[in-house]
Amino acid sequence: MKFGVVVFPGSNCDRDVAYVTRDLLQQPTRMVWHEETDIADLDVVVIPGGFSYGDYLRCGAIAQFSPVMQRVVEHAKQGKFVLGICNGFQVLTEVGLLPGALMRNRDLHFICDRVPIKVERTDLPWTQAYSAEQLITLPIAHGEGCYHADADTLAALEDNGQVLFRYQGDNPNGSLNNIAGICDRPGKILGMMPHPERASDPMLGSTDGIKLFQGLLTAAVEQMAAV
Amino acid sequence: MVKRIYQARIYVTLRPSVLDPAGTAVQSGLEHMGFGNVEQVRIGKYIELTLSAEDEKAATAQLDQMCDQLLANPVIENYRFELVEEATKIGASV
C-alpha cells in the first residue's frame, strides 16, 4: 500500500507520519510537495498536522487552493483513502471533502495533552483493528479543534455513523457532540484532530494510534484477496 | 477597453448561531475596565483589497466568489463588502 504525505509550507507532522508508514509498517511512502500535480501512484494520501501557510486567514483555508489539493480531491473522488490529521482535518473541511468546520478551542488555549477517545465504529478500514467501543488514549495538540456544523449536518453525521472518534469524559475543546474525528459517508476520507502517528512507536509510550494504520493495511490485503 | 479600479472593504463576521469565545473573553476584559454595560462582543475580520474590473457588477460578482470560496467560510461566517471606485484606467494595461 503506497502512502503519500502532503507537505505544505508550515506542515510539521509530515515526517512523523512517514516514520510510521515507512519505518514502522514498512510501506512504500513518499513525501508530496504541495506544488505536485501527479499523485496517481498513491493509495493513501495523508495530510499531516502543522500550520499550513502559517494558518493565515483560517486554518487550512489557503491550503485548499494549492495545486496538490485539486489532485487530492480527484484521488478522493476515485474512492481512494484520504487521512487528514489535525491541520489536515482542517484542510479537508475547508476544501469540502468533509462537512463542518474547526473553530477556536472553547477556552481559547492551545491544548497539548493526551486524551481518552472512544472508537465509535469498527467496521471501517480505519478502525477495524480496534475492538468495539474501545477506549484509547491519543495525543492532541491544537488551538482550533472545536468541531462545528449546523444542526442538520450534525444529525446526518450521527445518523450515518460518520463519527468515528469521540472525546470521552471532559471535552477538551468544546467540539460539538464531543467529535474528535469524522469520515465521509462511504468511509474512505477520515479527518481527526488527535495524532495517531504520535502514538505508534512503543518507544513513545503508546501504540494506540498505530492500529489505525494497521487497519488500512488489513483492508488492502483483503482487497487484493478479493480481486 | 476601460478598466475601473475598485477598493473593496470586506467584513467577515461569525454567524449569529456560532459561539465566539474570543469575543466573550474581550467582553470580560471590557468589564474589568469598568464597562459593565457591554452586552455582547463579536470578533470578525476586516479585509481591504484593490481590484480592477469592467464595472461594479463584474467586481461584485468576483468578490462574491472570493468571499464564498476563500475569504469567508460559509459554514461559520457571513460576509458583506463595500465597493469604492478609485480610478478609471483607459486601455487594457491592467
Image (cartoon, rainbow, N blue to C red):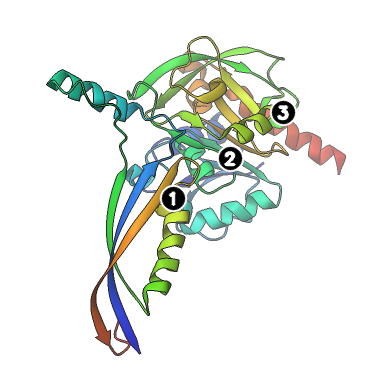
- Residue A32: x and y in percent read 49, 50
- Which chain does tag 2 point to? A
Q: CA distance from mark 2 to mark 1?
A: 17 Å
Determine if residue A114 is in view. yes
Please state which amino acid type lies under the numbered disc 1. Answer: Ala
Q: Looking at the image, is mark 2 or mark 1 earlier in the sequence? A: 1
Please state which amino acid type lies under the numbered disc 2. Answer: Pro
Reading the image, the residue beneath label 2 is A99
**Callout 2 and callout 3 share a chain:** yes
Please state which amino acid type lies under the numbered disc 3. Answer: Asp
Reading the image, the residue beneath label 1 is A63
Q: Is residue B57 above or below residue A43?
A: below
Q: Which residue is painted at 32% across and 50% down in the image?
A: B11
- Which chain does tag 1 point to? A
Q: Looking at the image, is mark 2 or mark 3 earlier in the sequence? A: 2
For the residue labelled by badge 2, is the local secondary structure a helix, a strand or a loop?
Answer: loop
Q: Is residue A142 above or below residue B44?
A: above
Residue situated furthest front in the rendering: B37
- Which chain does tag 3 point to? A
- Residue B92: x and y in percent read 33, 87
Closer to us: mark 1 or mark 3? 3
For the residue labelled by badge 1, is the local secondary structure a helix, a strand or a loop?
Answer: helix
- Quadrant of residue B34 in the image? top left
Packing grade of label 1 (10 A; few <14, some 14-19, many >=20) is many
Reading the image, the residue beneath label 3 is A159
